[in-house]
Amino acid sequence: MQKRAKIEEAVARKYPEQVVLVTTRSRSGKANVMAVGWTCVASGDPLMFALGIDDGAYTYELIRQTREFVVAFPGEKQGKETLFVGTRHGREMDKFRACGLKRQKATKVKAPLVADAVANFECKLVEITRPGDCPLIVGRVVAAHVNANRTLRRLYTVGRGHEMGGVRKV
Ligand SMILES: Cc1cc2nc3c(=O)[nH]c(=O)nc-3n(C[C@H](O)[C@H](O)[C@H](O)COP(=O)(O)O)c2cc1C
């Protein structure tokens, strides 16, 4: 039976929520990476991802400038790195270096792949819309990569306050 609730109370029950890493590279060549939980598939054919990225994020500025980025699915064991890159701004530091996240060259975009992620998707910007208070970035996937270790599992945000972990089949 459903009981009427405040919107905030109901949406607090959304977990587990997927989390992705979004990488970018500035025109001067500096790579950056951030964590994004507000994401979904926006089109199947061609494959597109939608990302809610705050306009204060350095990533937002770099996507607008370069019109390309990479979406990576972090692995279950990459919680620490995901939290690190999701709580610091790339304008102030090289987050890849600072947290030891390994990079790999992409094939069709200048933004790097996350070498140890479960999968990576190279994306070209399709559009930026603003349905509410957060810009919604839609990117078309132009190349994809999977980890050679196919047993790796994805990381999720499992509770409030950026609590992260894996999700098991029931
Ligand atoms: C698990 C997690 C999920 C996040 N999800 C989002 C999100 O969906 N959208 C967003 O704008 N910021 C999100 N953030 C916060 C950004 O990752 C954070 O503001 C980051 O410092 C931006 O980096 P940048 O300024 O280098 O681009 C999330 C952080 C964490 C830890």
Image (cartoon, rainbow, N blue to C red):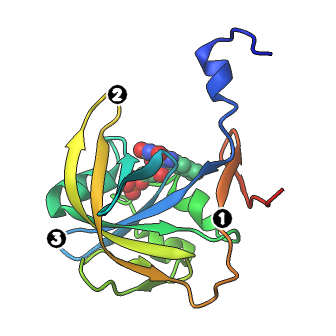
Q: Earlier in the sequence, mark 1 or mark 2?
A: 1
Tell me the mark number nearer the camera, choosing from 1 and 2. Answer: 2
Q: Earlier in the sequence, mark 2 or mark 3?
A: 3
Q: Label 3 sits on what residue type?
A: Arg
Q: Secondary structure at mark 3?
A: loop
Residue at 75% of width from left, 10% of height from top? 3
Dot 3 surroundings within 10 Å: few (below 14), some, or many (20 or more)? few
| Whether the residue under disc 1 has CB within 8 Å of ligand 1 | no
- Residue linked to disc 2: 133
Quarter that holds the C terminus: bottom right
Residue at 70% of width from left, 82% of height from top? 151
Q: Earlier in the sequence, mark 1 or mark 3?
A: 3
- Residue linked to disc 1: 80
What is the x, y in percent for residue 136?
31, 42
**Which disc is residue 114 wearing?**
none
**Which disc is residue 27 wearing?**
3
Q: Secondary structure at mark 1?
A: helix
Q: Label 2 sits on what residue type?
A: Asp
Q: Nearer the viewer, residue 57 or 129?
A: 129
Dot 1 surroundings within 10 Å: few (below 14), some, or many (20 or more)? few
Q: Where is 19 relative to 121, above or below?
A: above
Tell me the mark number nearer the camera, choosing from 2 and 3. Answer: 2
Between the C-alphas of marks 1 and 2, the distance is 28 Å
**Which residue in the rendered view is the most extreme toward the bottom?**
148
What is the x, y in percent for residue 152?
67, 78
